[in-house]
Amino acid sequence: VGVVRSPALATAVRSQEPAEAETFRIRLLDGWTLLRRSEEIRIRTREQRLLAVLALQGSRPRSYLAGLLWPESSEPRALANLRAAVWRIVHSARGLLYHDRSRVALTRAVCVDVDDMVACAERVTAWDRDRPCFRDVPAVEYERTLTVLACGDLLPGWRDDWVVYERTRLQQLRLRSLEVLADLLLLRGDAASALTAARSAAIIEPLHESAHRAVIRVHLADGNHNAARREYDNFRGRMLRELGIPPSKKMEALIRPLSAAQSRRWVLAQTVLV
Amino acid sequence: VARWQLRLFDSFSLTRGARQIPLRIREQRTVALLAMRGSRPRSYLAGVLWPDSTERRASGSLRAAVWRLERAAPGLLLHDRTRLALAEGVDVDVAELLDSVARPGNGVRTPDSGIDVDIRLPEVLLSGELLPGWYDDWITYERARIQQVRLRRLDAVTEALIDRGQYATALTSAMAAQSIEPLRESAQRAVIRIHLAEGNYHEALREYRAFRARLVRELGVAPSAQLDALVQPLLAARQRATSASVTSRPSGSRSASAQRGPSVPAQSQRRATASVHGQHSGAARVSSRRPGVRVQLPS
């Protein structure tokens, strides 16, 4: 006698078989989108929330999902909501979910943009660890990495704790990867791409100093002293206005040679005038 | 022959090679208990798994579970009349975590405790809770124990990484500890120290304010003096700058703005900055993303 198979289990087992790779795409960066091949599938907020948790956290027990998504409801009510959401998803997007009595997960036929971004961040870390090899990386590859890292915030406007935490984490990851990438591109002598990387980081968080330092480093390395100076002045002004704090010593150290040169020039001009 | 893989972090999953083995809750609980506690007498297992049943009923349930497991996952269990255990060579993620913590590190010592740690942050250290959503007493106990193991190790790794100036990885580690226990001050201190070390003052202050608010809301206490001391230089600089801008105003408006406190100039300035940066995403988005700026600092 084998295991008694409920109809739900039978579908679960079927969807476990390696389906056509990546039939579905879930996009969470810059807002919610669900695609089957290239056609958009529209689903309601409740189902979106369930898919977003699974996309971010992986396979989860039903009781956990019910508690996370419907914290105000009683347990039976929350579990019923979950069942309804699973049912709807299974009917509008077959092959997207794995589900059995105890847990729910996305199948391997789904590709999530957040995973792609994290992979890009990891790639940058690997390049950084092995700097000599980075010189051999083809330009297309780091350009793609740059594009992926430059894309937007996780589910903007969603306020659930689990989204907010993950949003902050991904933001930090992007900021850091873009800063490192800017430095690597500079080493490669590609100042234009380096500037794009540093700028993308600076746009993510207008008060993030290390990103602005990266922008200034690129300008300095490229000999654009004026642009470096302007970037510094803007950042300093913004910090003082918004936080009432000047930039750190690291930032000052970056710009100091410039100021010294400038004041020397000024003194020279004065002496000539006199 | 493919090995059994048992995952208890994030959710229960038993696989062999690429094959997922579906188990019912009763069988899952039995396997999880054996994975956590090792070889045990049947009577012990029955008592832990079915604490509310009579002894006879509980051992009946255990026999049924073993019978089903024998069919769904042949070879997973070792059993005789009195004892049960998982077979040799079942890979369990919990064991992997405990091994990685017990293993001697790669020669990096943490600055204060001098523990030798592996600073490579294995995946299993960053993964999720033990069987989330399971509420049995023994699970709750084991979950707390594992989280403590994780937290201690993450703290040590964070310290070692900060010490070596590897801030990016240090932040990943510190944020992992923070997510396990949002009210843990040591993790929060590490996050703030990393931001400060990198000159990211805005982030440091935002983290400080968010943590302070969380502590007050949930526990009704203020952060320790140690945490305050970290951001004190920033707050002092800010105080100086604001009082300077207040005194530099024409004397007629001074009393009014002094009464409204230091947040007023910051707020009116913020609007100006928002419109400067508004070109790419709209002024509202820029300001809404940084609500911390509006908060008036507690004195």
Image (tube, coloured by chain):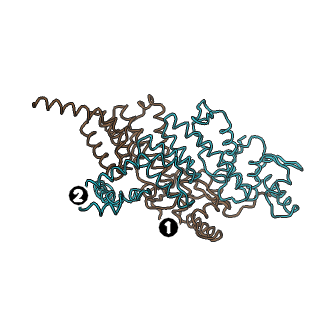
Chain colours: A brown, B cyan
- Label 2 resides on the chain identified as B
Q: Nearer the viewer, residue B168 or B94?
A: B168
Q: Quadrant of the N terminus of chain B?
A: top right
Residue A34 horizontal/vertical position (percent): 48, 59
- Label 1 resides on the chain identified as A
Q: Amino acid at mark 2?
A: Pro
Residue that appears at 86% across and 58% down = B59
Residue that appears at 56% across and 56% down = A54
Q: Amino acid at mark 1?
A: Arg
Residue B100 horizontal/vertical position (percent): 65, 38
The local crowd at label 1, few if under 14, some if 14 to 19, many if 20 or more residues have their Cα within 10 Å, is few
Give the number of marks.
2
Using the rendered view, name the quadrant where residue A217 is placed: top left
Residue B217 horizontal/vertical position (percent): 53, 61
Where residue B250 is drawn, which disc sits there?
2
Where residue A44 is drawn, which disc sits there?
1
Q: CA distance from mark 2 to mark 1?
A: 57 Å
Using the rendered view, name the quadrant where residue A259 is placed: top left
Q: Do circles 2 and 1 both sit on a common chain?
A: no
Q: Quadrant of the C terminus of chain B?
A: bottom left
Q: Nearer the viewer, residue A198 or A51?
A: A198
User: Is label 2 in contact with label 1 (beta carbons under 8 Å)?
Assistant: no
Q: Nearer the viewer, mark 2 or mark 1?
A: 2
Above or below for B189 versus A91: above
- Circle 2 — which element? loop
